[in-house]
Image (cartoon, rainbow, N blue to C red):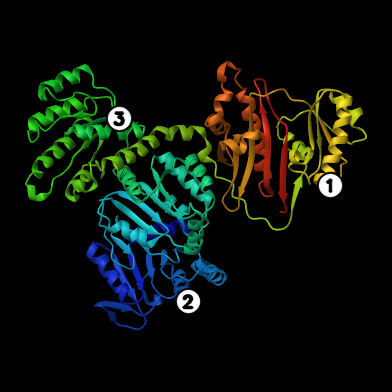
Amino acid sequence: MLRDNLKRLLAPRHLAFVGGRSMARALKRCAEGGYQGQMWLVNPQHDSLDGVPCVRSVGELPCAPDAVFIATNRELTLTCVAELAAKGAGGAICYASGFAETGAEGQALQQQLLEAAGDMALLGPNCYGLLDYLHSAALWPVAHGGKAVEKGVAVLTQSGNFAYNLSMSDRSLPVAYMASVGNQAQIGIAELMDALLDEPRVTAIGLHLEGLKNVPGFARAAHKALEKGIPIIALKTGVSQIGAELALSHTSSLSGSDALYDSLFERLGVIRVSGPVSFVETLKAAACGHLPKGGSLIALACSGGDAGLIADYAERNDLSLPKLDDGQVRELAQVLPTYANLVNPLDFTTAIWGDGAALERMLDSALRTEADAAMLVLDYPAEFTGERKECDLLLELYCAALKRHGKTGFVTSALPELLPAFARERLHAHGIAALQGVEDGLAAWGRIAAYQGQRQALLDLGESALPPLCPQALQGESELLNEWQSKQALQAFGLPVPKGVLSTPEQALANAQQVGYPLVLKAVSAQLPHKTEAGAVALNLRDAQALGAALEQMRARIGAYAPGVAFDQLLLEPMASAPLAELIVGIKRENDFGLALVIGAGGILVELLKDSKSLLLPTTDGAIRKAVLGLRSAALLQGFRGREAADLEALVAAIRAVADYACENAAQLLELDVNPLMVGAQGTTAVDALIRLGQV
């Protein structure tokens, strides 16, 4: 029922506004914007406001409205939500602040609000609302700059001001929906994404995030988008420490670890951008719904300088510029002057500027290519020059040529302001992206091309279909398992460990015969997690005499380092042969966000190289292999300088064992480290391990 009510909110047959004069103006804006359904203004104190008749109470509404904007204080909001839910309204938007973002008292009020809503869809509180340009329904407290569209992108943001500014921007972004989600008490980013993906006129989704409240739900919706081929573009704030603190105070958002957001986005094919301009331009590149099949371009400009910019920015964004074939060169030579450089990017010069027939011949020759898409740099001069008609001619010919050749394409300008609004609107009417600025335009197109190139591979990998584990915070004390206990626990899940013997100082010499020399001696104690610093490890002991000396030396060193730690348990293991590489495999717990498998260069190189990859759990063998081979140190595993190649299957299986243990014990696992994991040509062995468990 909640989902059905959310669908009512997103395609409303009737609207209600609860509040004062500002709500009367909001209702008028809907009428002026073309909304066709019934609308009511609810106000108990006035018969009319600004010429809009008022209904005295929610109970007096002639029917249960599909969508309601509530602009009252927080106490009245609670009452109004309960009345609307009882009447059977579809959804309500709560504008008031003073809820969970203000602390414990506000959190309690937000819980009451949630209970009052029941199965009615609730957006907010502490939000600006919803702009629905598919149905011209503006559930919004102030003016906005958008207009009705036939199709376009959906933008979901935790900042009402960001949404307001985006609607006012001079970028011609076709917006189907704009939602300010606020505190996400009930309906949040995940739920909106899932519902909007069922609307075929939504061509891409843009997210301006401070944090996610429902990571598994977000992952399910993002996987659905990946299956449908609907790009998701994310601008994530809260990267800095101060930014994370601001997110908490703004909408009570969980910012989480930025590295884990990167892992989440990479897993799901979410395109992450760094700022508002790249956010808008990347959305525009996807907005028409005509996405490129790959990253090759045929690029056109009427300036050698522009062609040079194209070449540089294309390479920077992994876009290829395939050579013109001999037939294209011959045809172009017949229409372009002798000084034209017949290469891709093509500078077709200004010699044919304004010559419709010559431009059409040039376009037909250039677009007869296997390149995945076409681009044109088109710079409009100022209107007073009287020279815009030549640009209009080229624009129309280019649009027609793309259609004639069945090509995906876009237009950009050298500088953002040189592609005016009327030209952008004309291009978008043809389903062609109008990007502003050659640098930002090629970067945006490169992101969309990369998304298309990796989408099927991500689906085949299978990881995107697995909702991440989302462990809750644990209270109370934790327990650190010693090395022997940690290894035994992991070995039960398939992690290869040395065939060691748990011993005592008194039995060590006898047990050594069972293990065989050379061997490794380690003190076993949960109070010595860092054994090397404590002198609790002795390597390559070749005989009984060396073992005896090591025992005495170890007893003395531990006594000096940690006088209260008993020297009563020892681990004897065969000395491992030199590996091809040492890795570290660990588990990082981010409460209420995810459990991450961290794979990196291990041993003494952990801090030096800082070479690691993170995968949210659960994961797949394919994703583990990809992460291992994505390390900067991966060459050591692939026959570096004539050495043997690592047994990758054994390595993946060993890492999988750690992941399986973590998934099985996700509720209580706080910390896990396997370091080093010795990787060889014929197998992989974990020579040290540490596990910390909490109380469930």
Please identify the quarter of the rendering in which residue 396 is found.
top left
Name the residue carrying label 3: 372
Residue 140 is situated, as x and y percent measured from the top left of the image, at: 34, 65
Kindly identify the residue that appears in the image at 12 percent across and 49 percent down: 382
Kindly identify the residue that appears in the image at 54 percent across and 32 percent down: 631
Q: Residues within 10 Å of mark 1 (few under 14, many from 20)?
A: few
C-alpha gap between disc 3 and disc 1: 67 Å
Residue 656 visible: no
Left or right: 51 with respect to 257? left
C-alpha gap between disc 3 and disc 2: 57 Å
> Along the polypeptide, which appears first: circle 2 or circle 1?
2
Q: Is residue 639 above or below residue 467?
A: above
Please identify the quarter of the rendering in which residue 485 is found.
top right
Kindly identify the residue that appears in the image at 37 percent across and 39 percent down: 447
Residue 297 visible: yes
Residue 75: give its label: 2
> Along the polypeptide, which appears first: circle 3 or circle 2?
2
Is the residue under label 1 in contact with that under label 3 (CB below 8 Å)?
Answer: no
Left or right: 184 with respect to 559? left
Name the residue carrying label 1: 565
> Which amino acid type is marked by label 2?
Glu
Mark 3 or mark 1, whichever is nearer to me: 1
Q: Quadrant of the C terminus?
A: bottom right
